[in-house]
Amino acid sequence: MPAASVPPPAFDLTDEVRSALERGRAVVALESTIISHGLPRPDNLRVAREVEAVVRSHGAVPATIALAHGRVRIGLDDEALAAIAANANVVKAGVRDIAPVLVGGGYGATTVASTAHLAALAGITVFATGGLGGVHREAAKTFDESADLITLSRVGTTVVCAGVKSILDVPATLERLETLGIGLLGFGTDRFPGFYLADSGLRVEHRVETAVEVAEVMAARAASGTQTSALLVLNPVSAGEQLDPALHDRVLHAALDAAAAQGIRGKDTTPYLLARLHDATQGRSLAVNTRIISANAALAAQIAVAAAAAR
Ligand code: PSU
Ligand code: MN
């Protein structure tokens, strides 16, 4: 569906994104928390630019989403992208943070949740990221469950990801995805991907092989009125490119212990753990993370092109 609705008044779409949406062309939403909080400087700016280039090279228009100077920006120019990447004061903005950050007038980087929310309002149906937030380990005690999950139960966006971050309790997250009615499609796999790892050890029921099949499922969701919650397209890193599982387990446990010892909590938890992993693996987890994001951006662009052709 092209943008049937007019975006709310605080939205600024770039001319390129607006024109693509008006013509029913392929657009891919991209989040900005991954740039500001998920990846270390200065690699983050390079990756953000590369991911936009990957989307373009597959025939779609990238729309990186962020908050800047009181406006919701759908599509960023290079100046805004560089500011989000360089500025240490950028707020990690979930859905509930959007309004206060707009009033504050500074920069806000949107998470999976707030990006999916804003993309849907702008009329963008396909979104690419690395790994989703979910249920944290020890959540039974801390109640730490990412707001990504509840938001994805409320918007019909198709989200291409490598599963949920492996720092989480993956089986518990899968149960919550089922409860919340969030759709899962394995892309060329029957296994739920493990973010840095090709396989989390869990199964996915539905599998597709091509972007055209994903577009068919999107159309069937619209036709059956089941587009009220998100569709996750699960795109695993290959076994050859994954982080060594033994290394992954070792550094993750050290990072979890360090987070507990330092009393890290709330929305600082995920950026802290990712940064510890990037340090402890001498950048190997960063390389895998970067590869995941690029591969997901490429697939999201192909899906957006197939969905646009089907309209
Ligand atoms: N995936 C990544 N890197 C990230 C994130 C996801 O590869 O930095 C971010 C996303 O923005 C996601 C957020 O929405 O982490 C989840 O944070 P929390 O667990 O605090 O909800
Ligand atoms: Mn949390």
Image (cartoon, rainbow, N blue to C red):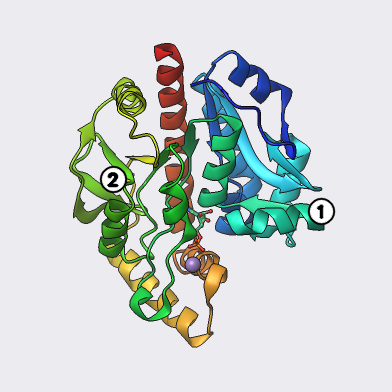
State the separation of the CA atoms marked 2 and 1.
Answer: 45 Å
Between 159 and 290, the one nearer to me in the picture? 159
Residue 268's quadrant in the figure? Answer: bottom right
Coordinates of residue 45 in the picture (x, y in percent): 65, 46
Report whether 307 appears left or right of 59: left
Q: Classify mark 2: helix, strand or loop.
A: loop
Label 2: few (<14), some or many (≥20) within 10 Å? few
Coordinates of residue 232 in the picture (x, y in percent): 36, 41
Q: Residue at x 38, y 34 (%)?
A: 227
Coordinates of residue 158 in the picture (x, y in percent): 42, 35
Q: Classify mark 1: helix, strand or loop.
A: loop
What residue did someone put label 2 on? 240
Between 13 and 165, the one nearer to me in the picture? 13
Q: Amino acid at mark 1?
A: Gly
Name the mark on residue 293.
none
Q: Amino acid at mark 2?
A: Gly
What residue did someone put label 1 on? 105
Residue at the extreme front of the image, as rendered: 225
Residue 300's quadrant in the figure? Answer: top left
Task: In the rendered view, tell whether residue 282 sits above or below residue 63.
Answer: below
Quadrant where the C terminus is found in the figure: top left
Q: Residue at x 66, y 17 (%)?
A: 19
Precedes in sequence: disc 2 or disc 1: 1
Q: Residue at x 61, y 47 (%)?
A: 32
For disc 2, does the CB lie below 8 Å from ligand 1? no
Between 270 and 98, the one nearer to me in the picture? 98
Report whether 5 appears left or right of 303: right
Task: In the rendered view, tell whether residue 59 sits above or below residue 175.
Answer: above
Tell me if residue 255 can be seen.
Answer: yes
Coordinates of residue 195 in the picture (x, y in percent): 36, 52
